[in-house]
Image (tube, rainbow, N blue to C red):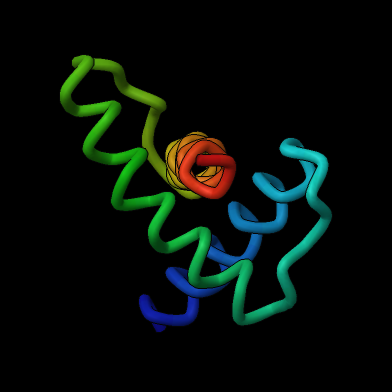
């Protein structure tokens, strides 16, 4: 059951990041992958900065969304050069 929640959180975070970055969605699979990678990046950033987003589902979505936004921004920078 944990893997299903992981995928749902990844989907929501990927969709939110795409919406926040004005690029729309990336499809279900793309949003899930973006959200999962965002969770890894966001977890690293938040722990490095000593910031806590709180626990539970909402905290996980926040961390994954922030990480996914950072990932999209980095990919856009690389794509421009």
Q: Is residue 23 left or right of residue 64?
A: right
Q: Is residue 27 left or right of residue 46?
A: right
Q: Can residue 59 be seen by looking at this rendering?
A: no
Q: Can residue 68 be seen by looking at this rendering?
A: yes
How many numbered marks are there? 0
Residue 59: give x, y in percent of width and height: 46, 37
- Decide which of 63, 23 is in the foreground and name it: 23
Residue 28: give x, y in percent of width and height: 69, 78
- Decide which of 8, 65 is in the foreground and name it: 65
74 relative to 30, above or below? above
Q: Residue at x 59, y 52 (%)?
A: 13
- Decide which of 40, 56 is in the foreground and name it: 40
Q: Residue at x 47, y 44 (%)?
A: 78
Q: Residue at x 36, y 39 (%)?
A: 42
Outermost residue, front side: 81
Q: Residue at x 79, y 50 (%)?
A: 23
8 relative to 72, above or below? below
Q: Quadrant of residue 45?
A: top left
51 relative to 5, above or below? above
Residue 68: give x, y in percent of width and height: 51, 46
Residue 22: give x, y in percent of width and height: 82, 41
Quadrant position of the N terminus in the picture:
bottom left
């Amino acid at each position: 059951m944990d893997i299903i929640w992981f995928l749902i959180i990844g989907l929501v975070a990927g969709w939110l990041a795409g919406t926040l970055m004005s690029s729309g969605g990336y499809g279900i699979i793309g949003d899930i992958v973006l959200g999962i990678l965002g969770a890894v990046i966001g977890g690293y950033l938040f722990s490095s900065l000593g910031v806590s987003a709180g626990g539970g589902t909402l905290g996980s979505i926040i961390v994954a969304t922030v990480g996914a936004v950072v990932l999209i921004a980095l990919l856009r920078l690389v794509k421009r050069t």
